[in-house]
Amino acid sequence: MIRAAIAALCLFVSGLVYPTDETPSDVAKTAEPQAAVTSDPKVEFTEAYHTYQQLFADGKYTEALPYAERAYQLGLSIYGDNHKSSAALALNYGDALLKVDQRKQAVEMLDTAISMYERVYGKDAQALIDPLMARGNASGSWEPEEQRKYYEQALDLVRRFLQADDLLRARLNLEAGAHLLQNGNADESRRYVKAAYDQYHKQLPATDARVGVAAFWLGKYEFANGDAAAAEPYFNQALVAIERDGVPPGPLVVAAHTLLVGVYQQLGDPARATPHCVAVGRLKPWEEPVARTPLYGPPPDYPAAAKGRDGYALVEFTIDAAGFVRDPKLLKTQGSDSFGEPALLAISQWRYAPRVVDGQPVDTPGVQAQVEFKLTL
């Protein structure tokens, strides 16, 4: 069917948060300079490295990048390229490049890191787990076979060196599955995410945040695969584990509520979507009746009468206290008058997070949305 293109809600959780006591499989994140000496290169190295560490820990990746590069360059001059500290610094620099989406440079740096790790530790060493996982993350959606290759190499080392109940297995499976799913490789992601979920679910209580994170990603897989009914229990399980009274909500809490709106709307049960609309309204408050991104916004049909022209319809409406669209009115169209009717029909099905005042959701009149129409085949 020819459909109109419309900006869709994009839920992207950039990276996984593990509130765990799991230890990393390598020293890459904590490579420390050797004992301080009086030579200027070592003093400069110490300053560059600790500045990189602090900025990276604070999530200031762009600012951290030049310090990661400088620490790596100075580390090479101090330790040489056959030293474990140089290998760890190369991995840190590659990770920093990946964080700012310089993937080509990240791939080159991580390949260098892997070579250095192999020289220092051996080609089948446990220490290679982290650089192999990082290299898989850097491959991205354009190289799915290469991405899986690096993940499998890392996980093979995990199976070889770690006990079956070591939770690092689950963490790395979840990391691989989440990256594959984010990169559009949904079919390949499932076995990794499912393995992580099964292990966490078996070894940890249902209220453990790690179970919740794995359940969230398994729900995302099912939803991306078009199975809202299968996704629903996983998103609810995620909320049980990660949404706590008195604890500031993280992005996964908002994402789970938002996705459950779409789940229940697709299942034809808008009443069950309502508490999740309200929850997002409370978690992400707004004050003015400005254009908002719908939590659920199926696109309109492209009208045949528009004859291939692009354009839009501007609609004004009320978002009620339950997040429903009420009283939509067409203000104007651009490109074709025929855009008006399908825009009104589609927007009547949308769901929003309501505005919350003094802790209570309220009606918000005068909200406007521009529904875009673009012929797609």
Image (spheres, rainbow, N blue to C red):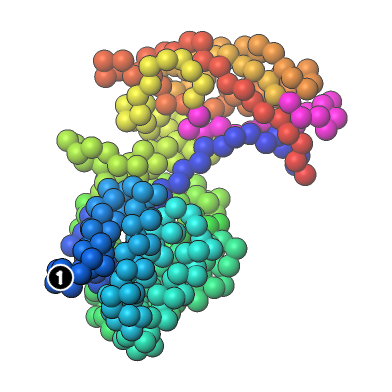
Q: Which secondary structure lies at badge 1?
A: loop
Q: Residue at x 24, y 75 (%)?
A: 165
Q: Is residue 127 magenta?
A: no
For the residue pair 24 and 359, the one nearer the viewer reads as: 24
Give x and y (percent) for residue 359.
26, 19
Where in the figure is residue 140, as x and y percent of width and height?
53, 62
Q: Residues within 10 Å of mark 1 (few under 14, many from 20)?
A: few
Residue 133, relative to residue 337: is it above or below? Answer: below
User: Percent position (x, y) of residue 11?
Assistant: 46, 43
Please tell me which residue is depicted at 78% across the width and 22% down the height of the picture. Answer: 335
Q: Quadrant of the C terminus?
A: top right
Give left or right: position of 222 versus 41.
right
Up-down relation of residue 122 to residue 351 (above or below): below
Instruction: Name the spot of residue 270 as percent of width and height, x first.
Output: 47, 30
Q: Visible in this render: residue 297?
A: yes
**For the stretch drawn in magenta, what is the main secondary structure?**
loop
Residue positioned 53% across, 57% down in the render: 183
Left or right for 234, reference 349: left
**In the rendered image, the vertical position of residue 320 relative to residue 57, given as above or below:** above
* Figure quadrant of the N terminus: top right
Q: Is residue 4 left or right of residue 148?
A: right
| Residue 299 located within the stretch drawn in magenta | yes
Hey, which quadrant is residue 158 in on the image? Answer: bottom left
Q: Quadrant of residue 142?
A: bottom right
Q: Foreground: 83 or 156?
A: 83
Question: Which residue range is magenta in the image?
Answer: 293-311
Please give the residue where the numbered disc 1 appears in the rendered image.
Answer: 37
Query: In the depicted view, which residue is nearer to us: 49 or 180?
Result: 49
